[in-house]
Image (cartoon, coloured by chain):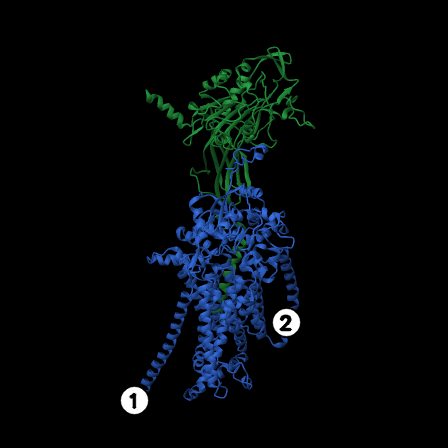
Chain colours: A green, B blue
């Protein structure tokens, strides 16, 4: 019995599939409110996540024990929490992310300073405490009550692997705004605010001149993928994860509609927990055409083939990845070759090319950063040597006149010498 | 009864043979002694330190030799080294002068063939001393061709221990010069021998030894310019003959072919201006021979007519050809000369245009004191040698004069070329000293009457023979008689020259006669007083003794330091050993990834590849200026910029050599201005005045400029220095090399992290931090707690 159970487990483990036992720690402001998110957590459990819910002030909290991380993912549903109980603090959470684990944070207008600082560590600027996102045009009416902070016209990013969709129904949002720097490399706006929205704290005096977060520069839900592929999602609204919003029937601009919150948040959470959009590149190899061995290096002008296998893990199940935009570079100071890799449909990407007529220490370089997918960054060093002394052509056609002149002068010298010495 | 004369004859023969054998034996004994001396005087470095490879370049040669012994000849010939000059790589086989490496590899092979299991490092360590012994032999040969065997022995003795040559050939100094000086003198020896003998066999050996020289050292261009110069001088002085042709023509033709087939020279042998002189002399030589041939064939009247006709045509054609050549040469900015040659012709060239050449200390002009230091009393004797050579000008002594004069000029331009000067000075000094001693000993012999009579006859025959050969022989005419009180006694007597026969036939006869003739060339009348002779001889002996003492001192105390291990005397009489370099290289070797790239200033490139076995960005083979400039730029830039430069080169570790804690003066801070200059030469954003105080001083104290104190070099050198200096010397932040407190005590690094600092802080290794995993926003950065860059 145990064997029958263990074998597939081993196989799964061998495939790098860990989602079957992925454990998630959820920290709530108040454990008793867990029921509000029952559908969200239920869906995650259906996807195989092992969810433990604890209070943010729980004194037994810890992420790490004896150098081992106890959880794979962390959910912070406690916007007002100024600190954490137990052995968790901001530094531990950063360490958690830096070691490749994921965090899903939900904030709201009451978001504490420490939560905002935490978000800032991931490159997200959250607006001041007490501010809300307003929209006087694309808001929703819920239960007959018109609420200008209940945003319904958010722009879901066009990255199905990250957020699912496309969604016909709106994603409801009520909460705080955040922005990411214009040159952010790692952060993506997963749910952008409508262009008519703005962020404002009603109890605070307006700054003069007003410096507001306005329009589509506001990010409602931000997805960050760190350089080690750890993922962080910061949602400006905690309510968007509640059963209430999942089931709500709202009126937007006079049209009654269901919401997409359930699908959106669960997909987003699965993405955050690296259950979706994970690419694994492996078995990088290269060889001369007509040979299967991987050489130490090439000679200039060799014809070579480069191959790499890329699989996409979806729910822990590997399936061949297909894309036309993975580029291979062949670099020595500058890229001499930069071409998209061809794929064969089974996850093997390849490119045949001619090594440039330049010797040096080249490197293969793939830097694939497609929105929603984990990064592929591969380098592999290959020296390219010049011709050896015996690899040049022995006789050149264009040099025949020179050969002729050399031979003729030798013959002439010999004849003259012979004549001079013996003709007396 | 008729047997008696036969017996006498046989007895005489046996006696003569015995004397000859004794003379030869003592000569060979002396030569052996000189060789042993030359070898052993260079072993101080092993005795005082250990058997290690010295300095910088020898490490590269050592590494290539290791490769050669492991992988074989063809692998080395085609070796593409991917561990230097990353990412450009270096074609070792095509860019190295392989003579030294092949030599050491061959010695290694031979020893191992006889099952003598010696490590390749020991072979490399001892190659230079071995070849300095050979060089002494070559000098002996050269001078005995030019003057006499006695002078040859003196020359061999001088060159065996001359400090200038010792400085580059002590045990462990496995540099090209170690074999190249031998090769140089060897070529000269065979050239002079060929000029004297006119033998084609000698000419072939000459070509072969020239091939070896080209293989060994870039300095071969000195030969290929000196020999044409000599050739032209011979034509000019009317000393043109067939022997010169036999010596010179095959050398140009075959020598050029040989140098073409050495990859590092290749087509330079016909394209670069360095070699034009040889071709020019080649042509002139042929023309001159043709003219003399035609003159012999035709009557004077016809010859004049022909000459005027040919001259008209030749001038027209020559002008045409010259304009073509000038046009070709003028296309190149350096007029077809390599940078190093330009530096020699125009000593200010490098400092104006090629900072890399100017930055090397051995490319600086020497101080006058180094002539005394490196040559000692030979400096005084050499001019006398030139006079002595000119006084009795022969083909060979003319060559010595030309060699001496050109070498003096070149040594004045570059301190490194003192090496070329050293054998010349030794040879000339030997000529001078041996002439002097001939006179003195001859005078002394004159006072012993029983020798006077018997040798007077011989001397007459010898003089008669010599007189027949030409005016240059300076026969003992009345003009050579001493004016009363003439100080230079060597002018009085003109000892006959043994080895300058016009033909092979005459050679033996003049040799025999000269041996007997020499001591009593002057008669009793011209001889100096016995007392004067004795005093002068004693003085010479004392000077020679002083020379030996000086040379031993120079070898033992000045030139034996391997420069990777340093010593400083302690108060209790012992030595404090600074072994920081090897410590740091060993750290790199054991603690970093084998493929890690290490950046440093180029001086340390060879050592890093050889000792740490890590890939370097630039090294002492300064073939690519812009790549070196990139490293110089990084060192001169701010930390953030340097980080991105190093990242773009895949550099993982950066090290600097820092002497401020122990007072080691040749550290990177002192070399820094060269980095700025070289970097600024390619990247104009680096400007030298930014690193100098308004008064134009180079300082790293509080008066240093902001750019200077923010440069990466400053930061890497002085990171954490203030605390350490307080601990070790009690003076916070005082740099012991510069002798003042540094400008900025609190040095913070955010893009680099210190990973290793050697015991005396002479080498500090830093890691280039990775890109941060996350990009915190400014808000997080402001809080100051988020500088997470692991």
Q: Position of residue B358 (x, y in %)?
A: 57, 57
Q: Considering depth in this image, is B281 or A319 the residue closer to the camera?
A: A319
Mark 2 or 1, closer to the camera? 1
Pointer 2 and pointer 1 on the same chain: yes
Label 2: few (<14), some (14–19) or many (≥20) C-alpha neighbours in 10 Å = some
Query: Tags 2 and 1 in contact by the CB under 8 Å rule?
Result: no
Name the one closer to the observer, A342 or B41.
Answer: B41
Q: Residue at x 54, y 72 (%)?
A: B401
Q: Residue furthest right?
A: A209
Kindly give the residue lying farthest to the top in the view shown: A144
- Residue drawn at x 47%, y 34% is A307
- Dot 1 falls on a residue whose secondary structure is loop
Res. A140 image quadrant: top right
Which element is circle 2 on? Answer: helix
Which mark is first along the chain, 1 or 2?
1
For residue B646, above or below residue A314: below
Quadrant of the drawing holding the N terminus of chain B: bottom left
Which residue is under mark 1? B1
State the CA–CA distance, disc 2 to disc 1. 69 Å
Chain of the residue where label 1 is placed in the rendered structure: B
Taking B149 as reference, is A263 left or right? right
Mark 2 chain? B
Residue A31 screen position, x and y as percent: 48, 19
Q: Is residue B144 visible?
A: no
Left or right position of B743 against B178: right
Residue closest to the eye, A245 or A274: A245
Q: Which mark is residue B307?
A: 2
Q: Nearer the viewer, residue A96 or A260?
A: A96
């Amino acid at each position: 019995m145990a064997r029958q159970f263990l074998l597939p487990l081993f196989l799964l483990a061998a495939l790098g599939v860990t989602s079957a036992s992925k454990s998630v720690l959820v920290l709530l402001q108040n454990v008793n409110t867990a029921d509000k998110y029952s559908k969200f957590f239920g869906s995650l459990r259906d996807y195989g996540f092992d969810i433990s819910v604890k209070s943010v002030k729980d004194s037994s909290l810890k992420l790490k024990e004896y150098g081992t991380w106890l959880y794979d993912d962390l959910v912070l549903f406690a916007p007002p929490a100024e600190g954490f109980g137990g052995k968790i603090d901001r530094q531990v959470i950063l360490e958690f992310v830096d070691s490749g684990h994921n965090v899903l944070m939900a904030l709201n207008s009451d978001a504490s300073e420490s939560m905002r600082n935490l978000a800032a560590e991931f490159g997200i600027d959250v607006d001041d405490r007490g501010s809300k996102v307003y929209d006087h045009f694309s808001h929703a009416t819920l239960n007959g009550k018109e609420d200008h902070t209940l945003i319904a016209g958010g722009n879901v990013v066009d990255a199905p692997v990250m957020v699912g969709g496309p969604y016909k129904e709106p994603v409801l949002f009520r909460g705080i705004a955040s922005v990411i720097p214009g040159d952010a490399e790692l952060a993506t706006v997963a749910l952008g605010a409508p262009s008519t929205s703005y962020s404002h704290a009603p109890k605070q005096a307006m700054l003069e001149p007003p410096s507001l977060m306005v329009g589509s520069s506001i990010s409602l839900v931000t997805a960050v993928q760190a350089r080690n592929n750890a993922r962080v999602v910061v949602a400006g609204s905690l309510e968007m994860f509640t059963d209430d919003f999942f089931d709500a029937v709202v009126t937007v601009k006079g049209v009654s509609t269901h919401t997409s919150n359930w699908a959106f948040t669960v997909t987003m959470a699965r993405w955050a927990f690296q259950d979706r959009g994970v690419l694994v590149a492996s078995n990088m190899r290269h060889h001369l055409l007509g040979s299967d061995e991987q050489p130490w290096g090439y000679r200039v002008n060799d014809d070579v083939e480069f191959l790499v296998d890329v699989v996409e893990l979806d729910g822990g199940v590997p399936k061949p990845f297909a894309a036309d935009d993975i580029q291979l570079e062949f670099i020595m100071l500058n890229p001499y070759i930069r071409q998209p890799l061809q794929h064969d449909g089974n996850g093997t990407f390849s490119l045949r090319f001619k090594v440039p007529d330049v010797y040096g220490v080249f490197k293969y370089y793939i830097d694939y950063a497609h929105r929603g997918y984990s990064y592929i960054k591969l380098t592999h060093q290959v020296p390219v040597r010049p011709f050896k002394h015996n690899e040049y052509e022995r006789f050149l056609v264009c040099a025949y006149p020179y050969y002729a002149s050399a031979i003729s002068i030798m013959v002439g010298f010999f004849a003259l010498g012979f004549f001079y010495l013996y003709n007396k | 009864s008729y047997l008696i004369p036969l017996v006498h004859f046989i007895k005489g023969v046996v006696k003569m043979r015995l004397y000859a054998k004794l003379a030869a034996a003592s000569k060979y004994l002396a030569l052996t002694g000189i060789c042993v001396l030359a070898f052993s005087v260079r072993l101080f470095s092993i005795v005082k330190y250990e058997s290690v490879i010295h300095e910088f370049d020898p490490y590269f040669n050592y590494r290539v030799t290791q490769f050669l012994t492991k992988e074989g000849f063809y692998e080395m010939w085609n070796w593409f080294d991917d561990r230097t000059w990353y990412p450009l790589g270096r074609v070792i086989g095509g860019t190295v002068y392989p003579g030294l490496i092949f030599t050491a590899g061959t010695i290694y092979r031979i020893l191992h063939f006889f099952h003598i299991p010696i490590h390749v490092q020991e072979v490399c360590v001892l190659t230079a001393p071995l070849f300095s012994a050979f060089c002494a032999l070559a000098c002996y040969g050269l001078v005995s061709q030019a003057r006499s065997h006695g002078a040859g022995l003196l020359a061999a003795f001088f060159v065996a221990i001359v400090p200038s040559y010792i400085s580059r050939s002590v045990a462990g100094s496995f540099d090209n010069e170690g074999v190249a000086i031998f090769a140089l003198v060897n070529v000269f020896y065979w050239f002079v021998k060929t000029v004297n003998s006119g033998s084609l066999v000698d000419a072939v050996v000459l070509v072969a030894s020239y091939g070896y020289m080209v293989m060994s050292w870039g300095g071969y261009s000195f030969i290929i310019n000196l020999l044409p110069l000599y050739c032209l001088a011979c034509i000019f002085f009317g000393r043109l003959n067939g022997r010169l042709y036999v010596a010179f023509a095959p050398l140009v033709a075959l020598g050029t072919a040989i140098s073409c087939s050495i990859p590092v020279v290749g087509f330079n042998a016909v394209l670069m201006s360095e070699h034009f002189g040889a071709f020019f002399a080649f042509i002139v030589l042929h023309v001159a021979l043709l003219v003399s041939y035609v003159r012999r064939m035709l009557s004077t009247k016809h010859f004049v007519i022909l000459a005027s006709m040919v001259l008209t045509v030749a001038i027209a054609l020559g002008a045409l050809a010259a304009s073509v050549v000038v046009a070709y040469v003028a296309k190149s900015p350096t007029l077809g000369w390599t940078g190093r040659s330009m530096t020699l012709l125009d000593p200010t060239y490098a400092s104006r245009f090629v900072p890399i050449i100017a930055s090397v200390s051995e490319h600086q002009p020497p101080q006058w004191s180094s002539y005394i230091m490196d040559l000692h009393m030979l400096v005084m004797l050499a001019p006398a040698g030139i006079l002595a050579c000119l006084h009795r000008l022969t083909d060979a002594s003319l060559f010595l004069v030309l060699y001496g004069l050109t070498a003096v000029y070149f040594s004045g331009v570059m301190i490194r070329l003192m090496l070329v000067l050293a054998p010349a000075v030794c040879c000339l000094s030997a000529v001078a000293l041996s002439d002097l001693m001939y006179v003195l000993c001859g005078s002394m012999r004159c006072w012993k009457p029983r020798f006077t009579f018997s040798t007077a006859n011989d001397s007459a025959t010898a003089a008669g023979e010599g007189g027949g050969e030409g005016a240059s022989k300076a026969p003992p005419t009345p003009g050579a008689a001493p004016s009363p009180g003439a100080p230079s006694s060597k002018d009085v007597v003109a000892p006959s020259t043994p080895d300058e026969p016009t033909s092979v036939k005459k050679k033996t006869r003049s040799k025999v006669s000269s041996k007997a003739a020499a001591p009593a060339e002057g008669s009793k009348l011209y001889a100096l007083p016995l007392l004067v002779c004795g005093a002068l001889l004693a003085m010479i002996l004392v000077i020679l003794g002083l020379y030996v003492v000086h040379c031993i001192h120079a070898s033992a105390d000045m030139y034996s330091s391997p420069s990777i291990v340093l010593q400083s005397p302690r108060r209790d009489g012992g030595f404090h050993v600074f072994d920081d370099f090897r410590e740091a290289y060993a750290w790199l070797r054991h603690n970093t990834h084998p493929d890690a790239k290490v950046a440093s200033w180029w001086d340390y490139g060879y050592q890093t590849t050889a000792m740490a076995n890590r890939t370097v960005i630039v090294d002492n083979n300064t073939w690519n200026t812009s790549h070196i400039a990139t490293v110089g730029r990084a060192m001169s830039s701010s930390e953030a910029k340097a980080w991105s430069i190093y990242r773009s080169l895949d550099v993982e570790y950066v090290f600097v050599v820092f002497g401020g804690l122990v007072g080691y003066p040749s550290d990177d801070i002192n070399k820094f201005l060269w980095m700025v200059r070289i970097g600024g030469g390619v990247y104009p954003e680096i400007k030298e005045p930014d690193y100098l105080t308004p008064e134009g001083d180079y300082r790293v104290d509080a008066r240093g400029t902001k750019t200077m104190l923010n440069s990466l070099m400053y930061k890497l050198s002085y990171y954490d220095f203030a605390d350490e200096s307080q601990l070790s010397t009690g003076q916070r932040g005082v740099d012991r090399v510069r002798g003042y407190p540094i400008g900025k005590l609190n040095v913070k690094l955010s893009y680099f992290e210190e990973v290793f600092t050697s015991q005396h802080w002479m080498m500090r290794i830093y890691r280039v931090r990775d890109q941060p995993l996350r990009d915190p926003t400014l808000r997080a950065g402001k809080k100051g707690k988020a500088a997470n860059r692991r």
